[in-house]
Image: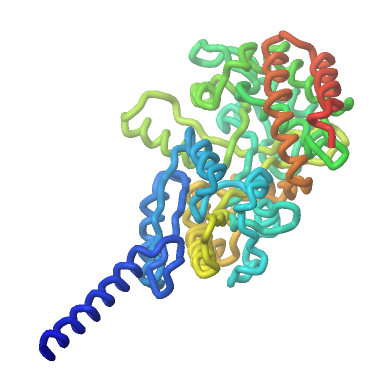
């Protein structure tokens, strides 16, 4: 009898121990204490080698933090945002998501404020890049890089036409100066093809956005409402139409996407192009290497990074911002789990991660230690230009979430179709302005 009791007691202890171990291993959302907590990460193929770097980074973190496991998923650029929005709207987002700090995320009340949760020195990060991870003054993420949208030029053609591109890089240029130089490029190239002074994708509104920013309209929406309702936006619209009607831009610009823009530039069919990013220089060099190796046909090309021209008397502005990791929570998540997610966030947007991503993308490095440890794959000329242009990036638009949502809707429902009609010759700059003014006064877009 005593032996049977001993066996029974031992078995009971073993079962309890096994149950406890099983509970620890399968604890969900950090709800089980003394367990391996799983932090989920949704991200994108930030650059060609990002997933392999991410795997190494995760392994390094898990070795140092055996109580935390990281599960990641690489989303596609085409469908990832929609997938995330569905998860967020159903209350089940991942713990960390790679993207921009958007007001619509805060509106769900699942975006977690970081101001009192971080264990790192924010002074190590670029202030403007950090500002782009804030909403209404509160920090919700850490930047992995600062993206930078600029213009570019064909170095060989610039030198052939005697254009002082270093002066433009160092001092900027006005709309009139750009027009005079772009007009030189409008001719027939050596292959007998039509060569334009300027090519920009026209399937979206980015060209108008670039020029509006450089004509005293840095933000489309302000606390007073839509700002694109005066002569400054009309001047930008008129300048774009002038470029198209005079043949400096292709007449079919409305149908040109980013791929077609690149193709035209690589085929010596454009002197200047937009929008460019610093990575276009190493990308072009890789293409040059493929040409030299006989892997592809084509003519080698060197890219010169250039600022967006500004209207006379207006401040030069570069279009840019930051993307990085944002922290979200789910119903029932414990403070312990959120704290573990913060640890992962700090690691995935730490100095090494920033240095690797910025170096791969040739973007200005937004962390002091990373800037000391990593180099950019840019010529000295273009690196200086990129650093100068990064200093021209404005802080984010400091409007509340409701106005930000209205701004997004105004852009999607009004600006994009109106700009497409303008580029197709279906409406005039004056009619486009009147459309902006009328819609800006409608109830759905007023503050």
For the residue pair 237 and 324, the one nearer the viewer reads as: 324
* Residue 425 at least partly seen: yes
Residue at x 16% of width, y 87% of height: 6
Among the 4 quarters of the image, the one containing residue 30: bottom left
For the residue pair 442 and 343, the one nearer the viewer reads as: 442
* Percent of width and height locating residue 319: 69, 40
Residue at x 67% of width, y 59% of height: 139
- Name the residue at the bottom extreme: 2
- The image shows residue 349, relative to residue 363, as above or below, that is below
* Percent of width and height locating residue 204: 63, 25
Count the numbered circles shown.
0
Among the 4 quarters of the image, the one containing residue 404: top right
Among the 4 quarters of the image, the one containing residue 148: top right
Quadrant where the C terminus sits is top right
For the residue pair 209 and 29, the one nearer the viewer reads as: 29
- Name the residue at the front extreme: 1
* Percent of width and height locating residue 128: 70, 55
- Name the residue at the top extreme: 426
Q: Is residue 38 found left or right of 163 in the rendered image?
A: left
* Residue 281 at least partly seen: no
Residue at x 33% of width, y 66% of height: 25
For the residue pair 315 and 205, the one nearer the viewer reads as: 205
Q: Is residue 337 found left or right of 163 in the rendered image?
A: left
* Percent of width and height locating residue 110: 60, 53
Quadrant where the N terminus sits is bottom left
- The image shows residue 353, relative to residue 431, as above or below, that is below
Residue at x 66% of width, y 17% of height: 249
Q: How is the image coloured?
A: rainbow
């Amino acid at each position: 009898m005593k032996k049977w009791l001993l066996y029974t007691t031992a078995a009971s202890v073993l079962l309890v121990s096994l149950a406890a171990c099983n509970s620890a291993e399968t604890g969900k959302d950090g709800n089980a204490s003394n367990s391996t907590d799983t932090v989920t990460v949704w991200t994108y193929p930030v650059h060609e080698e990002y997933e392999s770097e991410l795997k190494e980074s995760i392994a390094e973190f898990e070795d140092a933090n055996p109580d935390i496991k990281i599960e990641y998923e690489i989303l596609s650029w085409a469908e990832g945002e929609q997938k995330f929005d569905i998860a967020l709207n159903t209350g089940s987002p991942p713990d960390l998501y790679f993207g921009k700090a958007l007001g619509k995320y805060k509106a769900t009340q699942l975006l977690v404020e970081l101001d009192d949760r971080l264990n790192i020195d924010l002074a190590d990060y670029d202030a403007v890049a950090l500002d782009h991870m804030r909403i209404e003054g509160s920090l919700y993420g850490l930047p992995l890089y600062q993206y930078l949208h600029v213009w570019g030029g064909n170095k060989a053609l610039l030198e052939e036409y005697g254009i002082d591109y270093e002066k433009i890089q160092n001092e900027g240029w006005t709309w009139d100066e750009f027009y005079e130089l772009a007009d030189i490029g409008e001719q027939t190239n050596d292959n007998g093809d039509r060569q334009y002074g300027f090519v920009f994708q026209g399937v979206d509104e980015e060209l108008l956005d670039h020029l509006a920013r450089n004509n005293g309209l840095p933000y489309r929406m302000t606390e007073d409402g839509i700002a694109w309702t005066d002569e400054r936006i009309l001047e930008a619209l008129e300048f774009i139409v002038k470029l198209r009607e005079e043949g400096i831009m292709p007449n079919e610009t409305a149908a040109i996407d980013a791929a077609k823009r690149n193709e035209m530039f690589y085929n010596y069919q454009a002197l200047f192009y937009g929008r460019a990013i610093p990575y276009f220089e190493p990308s072009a060099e890789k293409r040059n290497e493929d040409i030299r190796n006989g892997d592809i046909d084509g003519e080698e090309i060197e890219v010169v990074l250039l600022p967006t021209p500004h209207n006379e008397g207006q401040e030069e502005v570069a279009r840019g911002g930051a993307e990085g990791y944002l922290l979200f929570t789910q119903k029932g998540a414990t403070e312990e789990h959120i704290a573990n997610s913060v640890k992962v966030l700090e690691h995935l947007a730490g100095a090494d991660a920033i240095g690797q991503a910025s170096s791969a993308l040739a973007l200005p490095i937004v962390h002091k230690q990373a800037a000391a440890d990593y180099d950019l794959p840019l010529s000295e000329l273009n690196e200086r230009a990129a650093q100068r242009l990064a200093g021209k990036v404005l802080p984010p638009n400091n409007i509340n979430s409701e106005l930000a949502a209205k701004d997004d809707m105004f852009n999607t429902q009004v600006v994009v179709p109106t700009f497409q009609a303008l580029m197709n010759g279906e409406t005039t700059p004056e009619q486009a302005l009147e459309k902006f003014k009328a819609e800006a006064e409608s109830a759905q877009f007023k503050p």
